[in-house]
Image (spheres, rainbow, N blue to C red):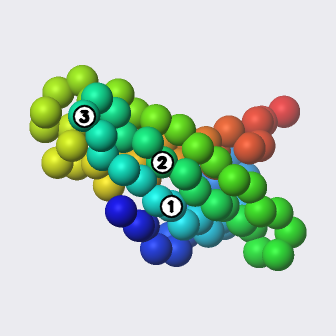
Amino acid sequence: MHLGATTHEHATSAKVYTYECEYVVEAHQITWTAKARRGNEIQVELAGSIPLTSPGLAAVAEQAVRDAVVTQIDGFEKPG
């Protein structure tokens, strides 16, 4: 499945990132890859997987993937 260009404001710096993502719901996990960028300055490829711990998680796969992507983006810039 494809998530089109979406913006995310970094949790601490308030810098705006744009990301696009592809994901696949498999039998035991959701795997995803994404490209994130901040303007023309930075482009990063991200990837991850989310274990399917309950059958209901597959129904909210898109939101679970969005949450995983923004968690990695928020990890780009650590305070202090």
In contact (CB < 8 Å): disc 1 and disc 2: yes
| 3 or 2: tag closer to the N-terminus | 3
Residue 68, position as x, y percentages in the image: 48, 42
Inspect the image, locate mark 3, and give the three-letter code of the amino acid beneath it: Ala
> For the residues marked 3 and 2, what is the alpha-carbon distance in whole angstroms?
14 Å
Q: What residue appears at the point 40 percent right and 33 percent down from the top-left corner? A: 50
In this rendering, position of residue 9 left or right of residue 77: left
Q: What residue appears at the point 64 percent right and 61 percent down from the top-left corner? A: 35
Task: Tell me the mark number nearer the camera, choosing from 3 and 2.
Answer: 3
In this rendering, position of residue 43 left or right of residue 72: right
Asked whether 17 or 46 is in front, the reply is 46
Task: Say what secondary structure mark 1 lies in.
Answer: strand
| 17 over 76 or under it: above or below | below
Instruction: Identify the disc placed on residue 27.
Output: 3
Residue 13, position as x, y percentages in the image: 72, 52
In this rendering, position of residue 20 left or right of residue 42: left
Quadrant for the C terminus, please: top right
Q: Residues within 10 Å of mark 1 (few under 14, many from 20)?
A: many
Q: What residue appears at the point 74 percent right and 67 percent down from the top-left corner? A: 38
Task: Tell me the mark number nearer the camera, choosing from 3 and 1.
Answer: 3
Q: Quadrant of residue 7?
A: bottom right
Quadrant for the N terminus, please: bottom left
- Mark 2 lies on residue: 32
| 3 or 1: tag closer to the N-terminus | 1
